[in-house]
Amino acid sequence: MVIIMLGAQGTGKGTIAGMISKQTAWPQIATGDIFRKNISEKTELGVEAEKYTSKGELVPDEITVPMVVDRLNQEDAKDGAILDGFPRTTAQAEKLDEILVKLGKKVDLVINLSTPKEELIDRMLTRRVCTNQECKTTYNIKLNPPKVEGVCDKCGAALKQREDDSNPEAINKRLKIYEEQTSPLVEYYKQKGVLRTEVVSESVNRMGKDVAEDIIKDIKK
Ligand code: AMP
C-alpha cells in the first residue's frame, strides 16, 4: 500500500507516518529527513540540497525525484511505503504516478492534515529533533516534551531545533510555498478518490496520535 502524507509544515505528518510505519512495517520515506542526513554527512547531495533547505526553498526535482525513485526501489518498500514530504508539487505528483506505474503500484491513500496557521507556527518553533540520524525522534517542548530537557528519551542523544524551524523567514517561506505549490495536490488526489482529510488541532482536541490510531484501525480492517 502506498500512502502519502499531505499537509503544511507542523501538522504532524512525520509523527503520524512514524506511527503507521511501526504498525505496518512499511518504511516512512521522509524526503526532508533524507536531505538532513545527507547534509549532516556532507555528501555531494547534501551540499547541493542545503543551498535550498536552509532558505526554506524546495530542492530541485533533478535532485529530489531520483532520490525518491532510488528509495522506493529498495527491498523494504516492496509491500508498501509511507511518503512523508513528497510529492510537494503537481509536477512531483505526476512524476510519482509514472514511477509507481513502472513498479506496478499506485497511490492508495492520501492523508491530508489540516491545522490552523497560528498552531502550525507555534509547533514549528517548539519542535525539537533528535540529532542521532538513526533515531530522528521528534518532540515538542510544549505538547510532547522529552523526560529530560534536551535529551532524547529513546537513544539519549542531544535534541536540537531544526535550522529552518528557528528562522522565522524560512518558516514563512515554507508555509507560502505550501499554500502556492503543495495545496493544489489536495484537489489532485480528491479527483482520484484517494483523499482522506483529517483536522489536527488542539481547538478540536484531536492530535496526531488520535488520527494515527484511527487510520491504523482502518488499514488493519
Ligand atoms: P521537511 O522536513 O519535509 O519540512 O523538509 C525540509 C526541507 O527539505 C524542505 O523545506 C525542502 O527544502 C526540502 N524538501 C523536502 N521534501 C522535498 C520535496 N519533495 N521537494 C523539494 N524539496 C523538498
Image (cartoon, helix red, strand yellow):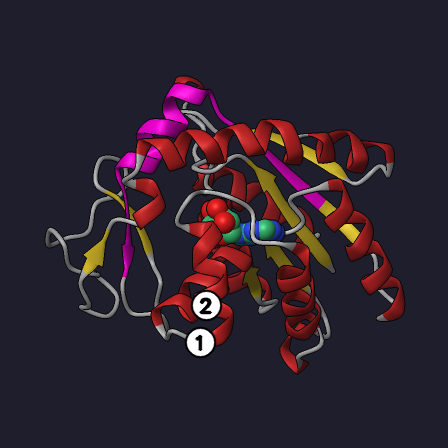
Decide which of 170, 10 is in the foreground and name it. Answer: 170
Q: Residue at x 45, y 51 (%)?
A: 53
Q: Left or right? Give the position of 177 relative to 181.
A: left
Q: Left or right? Give the position of 82 relative to 155.
A: right
- Label ID, residue 189: none
Question: Can the viewer see residue 220?
Answer: no
Q: As drawn, which residue projects farthest toward the bottom?
A: 75
Decide which of 47, 201 is in the foreground and name it. Answer: 47
| Numbered range of the magenta stretch | 110-130
Q: Residue at x 24, y 70 (%)?
A: 155
Decide which of 176, 29 is in the foreground and name it. Answer: 176
Query: Which quadrant holds the N terminus?
Result: bottom right
Q: Position of residue 124 (x, y in %)?
A: 34, 37
Q: Indicate yes or no whether the magenta region holds residue 176.
A: no
- Label ID, residue 43: 1
Q: Residue at x 80, y 35 (%)?
A: 188
- Residue under circle 2? 46
